[in-house]
Amino acid sequence: EKGTYPHFMLKEIDEQPFVIRKIIQEYQNENDEIKLDPEIRQAMKDCDRIYIIAAGTSYHAGLLGKQFIEKLANIPVEVHVASEFSYNMPLLSEKPLFVYISQSGETADSRSVLVQTKELGHPALTVTNVPGSTLSREADYTMHLHAGPEIAVASTKAYTAQMAVLAILAVDTARAKGIELDFDPMQELAIVATAMEALTDQKEKLEDLASEYLSTTRNCFFIGRGIDYYVGLEGSLKLKEISYIQAEGFAGGELKHGTIALIEDGTPVIALATQENVNYSIRGNVQEVEARGANSMIISMEGLNKDGDAFVIPQVHDLMTPLVSVIPLQLVSYYAALHRDCDVDKPRNLAKSVTVE
Ligand code: F6R
């Protein structure tokens, strides 16, 4: 039920801090240790490479899952779009573990890959919001997102829940492998939940930004480097699917290899700047697009922010920034769609779960 909310999407955006706190609870035992099926722990320890298979927003969460698993647990990870992988399987490592990320657990393209990898005898873990779903039943193991039903077609709380669960999985694996970490996922997630709340309280400001940048534009670009690039991909998907603005996410460094030709007077460019190691270079990219007339909006993080940034998110661990920086992007997309009279919860041509290949 929407309750007092005008749309499910807005309600689900607001639920994100509660979902993160629920995940902290569900994945912790009474000794403050990570609570996880020991068979999943073993499968993570036994594999030599992880193949993440997903579609759409879940694919974007997978790109960030790779960062967690490689940086914390030191296992190589490949992330694949299910529909591509299913007819063009790459060479596999000797002991692969397949991780299927799917809010609905019903995405036909992911299921088609699962059928194939099961035939090959490879273990499979499904990370889903619907534990009784097809992908959950047919995989060997399931991790539950605990996000509650997601009704709006545009995925919001499932995306942040997917990243939270993957961060916990990565840390659990690191600990099981005896890797010393200076990173307590539950503590970092608690900081994230608080930061999320500070952002969902700033709807007016984000609505103003949507009016200023997106009310009449035909297109919009998102740029970022490293994990900001992956969040930009998600921001552009959100914007295009509900507002029908042609939106694309690009890696900052790729701009000069073609995309910059698209920048005209007034083209909106949303830049993410939450990573210290690329803060200087992404701001250089913003200057390049501005010099060609772009109307740029910088979303940065406290501590890395500069005068003139349009929006500043609270400080969180640098691996955790996507869970927080996506919130202004979700809200800006929501208001852009609203101002353009689009059907926010049920955008044209889209279905909540895509059960055909
Ligand atoms: C975007 C969106 C879709 C889904 C995709 C995968 O907002 O909702 O891109 O993320 O269809 O769906 P699941 O996660 O159910 O496999």
Image (cartoon, rainbow, N blue to C red):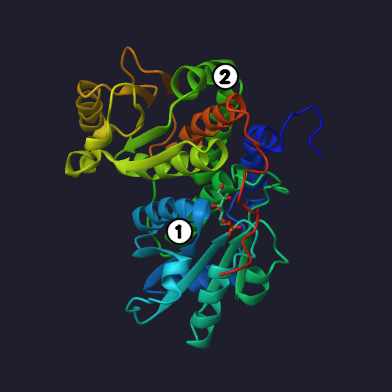
Could you give the CA–CA distance between mark 1 and mark 2, rounded to whole angstroms? 37 Å
Q: Let me know if residue 277 appears in the view.
A: no
**288 relative to 214 in the view: left or right:** left
Determine crowd level at label 2: few under 14, some 14-19, many 20+ residues with C-alpha closer than 10 A. Answer: few
Q: Is mark 1 within 8 Å of ligand 1?
A: no
Residue drawn 71% across the image and 33% down it = 7
Residue for point 39% across, 33% down = 220
Which mark identifies residue 69? none
Q: Position of residue 34 (x, y in %)?
A: 58, 55
In the picture, the quarter occupied by the N terminus is top right
Residue 13 coordinates in the image, percent (x, y): 63, 35
N-terminal label among 1 and 2: 1
In the rendered structure, find residue 175 and report the number of the disc placed on it.
Answer: 1
Say which mark, if any, is on residue 202. 2
Of 139 and 175, nearer the camera is 139
State left or right for residue 299 relative to residue 190: left
Ligand 1 located in image quadrant: bottom right
